[in-house]
Image (spheres, coloured by chain):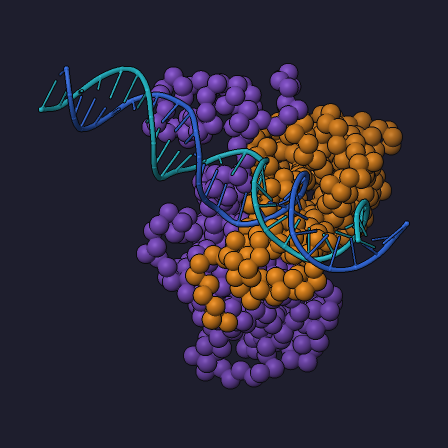
Chain colours: A orange, B purple, C blue, D cyan
DNA sequence: TTTATTTGCTTAAACGTTTAACTAAAACAG
DNA sequence: CTGTTTTAGTTAAACGTTTAAGCAAATAAA
């Protein structure tokens, strides 16, 4: 190895010269065109290997008007749901030999809009995204769609954008979780949530309300606590304050990091889970079974959602546009553990 | 909005025609060249905005031979350390207005080598990577370096590759953790680890051995347990078997997911942590303080490692090559919690 | 006034591919 | 043995930028 004079970048021109054929012949031979004879093909392929030729991706993309690249746009990455979803996406992207650009919005609409502007540069053939918490204006999304780039939404979707959507049954999951708490004897259930993500958080909140009202429980507004979507100590204080004033005996936490904050708040107040208060959380963290106590979770099919999003995007790129504007709902699962024990 | 005829992709040619100037004038005006008069510049910039012009990234990259893109190559993403490191990298990439391609090796040398082949296509200007667990041959890495693409390693590095490296003090951290267990009264400490990553795992193992020998403890080979690097139930069984046969009173787990497996194994055997056995783990999981019991961790400076890796890569890209081949060691921190209480 | 310099723009080549259009030779049909 | 088709290549244009080189007009220097 490292014996070849690898110093000067080798391109098709150099390959062609070395083989005494035209550049077109090289190009066609490498793409296995019907135009080129079998022995010439072999000569070209062998020379390419020997000289360590790698085609220039950008020249290729420019000419073909296709980048073999997709973008993943998500709010955060230090989140089990999203990192598992990325694994699902990657499982498809890898076999398609595509490349993945990743953009983190940190839940900022401004960053999200800026990134969409960038994507109009032809950098990607398609986009898989989960919208930022405070995105309300969808013009940036529609503008990109107008340029012909397909967008598949997952989890945090937009109702008023025509597109493929992969979601999970948030309303139903919250409904089931609330009933589970009621069945476990809770009389006063609070919902700990954050601002934003109308598509999923309001569905979860509505599922919670629905469960309460079908059981004939009168639910006060004070039972919904809104935290910040940053994992920090302030949230612990907010939750602790709520626990003191409202004294709930059941908690539904709507996003991953609120599990930690809720547990810490209970710990501070020496509330025993599940004796004094029962807790269930929407989370995919693998540590759920070893928490103190093991946490009852609503487990989202993150990997499968990512996988299906990617699959549908590639279908679309391949011309199968029959699923445009369809919404695919994958079920979440309630995993009962000790934190909601009777 | 959406009032402009956005259907046909607008490029420099179209812009130039609309303004009755040459393409070169448009290009230079947009890049704020000294060649173009101030009022022409303004006209161009305004027209570009009005017509929603976005430069073609690949044409630009092809011509400039620079992609404004870096690659992150890591084994896994569903891992707190890596996702936090990505956040650190992103914090720099975002301000530089670069783009990030992400590649997951899933700890496979074959995938890693294949990806390096792809990167020779000029797709990226630089690489930040953590090597796969079973990578021993480094020729793919050196080959890419030869093409002039700088590579910054972080965490899982390679001794025999000349490059910038960002690591944490694995030897020392393990040494401190082991001493911490000894101070807490442990007499028989086991190391739970996985195969691979010689740069970090052997350092951790050596730190462990060193601590034992300086304290004059004779440590048998049976005290090191090797698990698989997949989070699964088999690991729980392996650990449980070890706990039964060797009966350690202290455990050091060297990678994140082994914390969960270890806790589950102890749970199965009804071993009380920390009374019967004390546990410390290398992990960045935010749930550590709410585990049962709260877990003593060695917290790696993931975000800062990522940030510094990116900073050094950009320094290098900007021509500041004075740090080439330097290794930067950032300290990890032992966070003592109940799992190692005396 | 003449010459040199600066200003503001244009022309055209280049980046490394892909591909439509062409061609010369060989194979085949009638 | 002519006319058509097939085979195996070539030439050149195109993708959308950037930039070196050139040039006319305006300004400055002599």
> Can residue B223 be seen at all in this image of the molecule?
yes
- Quarter of the image for residue A30 reads bottom right
Residue A277 lies, in percent from the top left, at 72, 43
Q: Is residue B335 above or below residue A199?
A: below
Report the label total.
0
Residue A190 lies, in percent from the top left, at 72, 35
Give the left or right position of residue A124, taking residue B264 as reference: left
Residue located at (56% from left, 75% from top): B189
- Quarter of the image for residue A255 reads top right
Q: Is residue C24 above or below residue A316?
A: below
Q: Is residue A64 above or below residue B32?
A: below
| Residue nearest the viewer, comparing A21 with C15 | A21
Residue located at (57% from left, 31% from top): A117
- Quarter of the image for residue A15 reads bottom right
Give the left or right position of residue B303, taking residue B290 as reference: left
Residue located at (41% from left, 65% from top): B162
Residue A111 lies, in percent from the top left, at 55, 33
| Residue nearest the viewer, comparing A131 with B179 | A131
Q: Is residue B95 above or below residue B282?
A: above
> Can residue A72 be seen at all in this image of the molecule?
no
Residue B92 lies, in percent from the top left, at 46, 44
Residue located at (54% from left, 77% from top): B187
Give the left or right position of residue A50, taking residue B318 as reference: right
Give the left or right position of residue A287, taking residue B176 as reference: right
């Amino acid at each position: 190895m490292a014996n070849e004079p690898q110093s000067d970048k080798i391109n098709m021109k150099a390959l062609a010269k070395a083989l005494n054929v035209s550049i077109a012949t090289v190009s066609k031979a490498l793409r296995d065109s019907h135009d080129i004879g079998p022995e010439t093909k072999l000569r070209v392929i062998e020379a390419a290997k020997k000289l360590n030729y790698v085609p220039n991706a950008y020249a290729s993309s420019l000419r073909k008007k296709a980048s073999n690249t997709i973008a993943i746009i998500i709010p955060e990455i230090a989140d089990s749901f999203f990192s598992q979803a990325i694994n699902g996406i990657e499982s498809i992207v890898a076999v398609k030999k595509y490349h993945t650009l990743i953009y983190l919005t940190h839940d900022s609409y401004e960053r999200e809009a800026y990134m969409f502007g960038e994507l109009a540069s032809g950098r990607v053939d398609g986009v898989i995204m989960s919208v930022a918490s405070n995105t309300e204006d969808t013009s940036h999304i529609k503008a990109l769609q107008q340029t012909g780039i397909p967008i598949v939404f997952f989890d945090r979707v937009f109702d008023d954008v025509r597109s493929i959507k992969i979601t999970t049954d948030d309303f139903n999951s919250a409904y089931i979780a609330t009933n589970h708490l009621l069945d476990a004897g809770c009389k006063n259930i609070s919902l700990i949530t954050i601002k934003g993500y109308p598509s999923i958080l309001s569905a979860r909140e509505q599922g919670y309300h629905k469960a309460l009202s079908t059981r004939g429980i009168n639910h006060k507004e004070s039972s919904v606590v809104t935290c910040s979507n940053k994992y920090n100590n302030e949230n612990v204080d907010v939750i602790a304050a709520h626990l003191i004033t409202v004294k709930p005996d059941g908690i539904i936490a709507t996003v991953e990091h609120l599990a930690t904050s809720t547990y810490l708040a209970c710990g501070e107040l020496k509330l025993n889970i599940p004796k004094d208060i029962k807790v269930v959380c929407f989370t995919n963290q693998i540590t759920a079974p070893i928490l103190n106590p093991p946490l009852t979770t609503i487990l989202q099919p993150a990997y499968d959602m990512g996988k299906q999003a990617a699959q549908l995007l590639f279908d679309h790129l391949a011309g199968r546009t029959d699923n445009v504007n369809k919404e695919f709902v994958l079920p979440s699962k309630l995993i009962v553990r000790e934190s909601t024990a009777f």
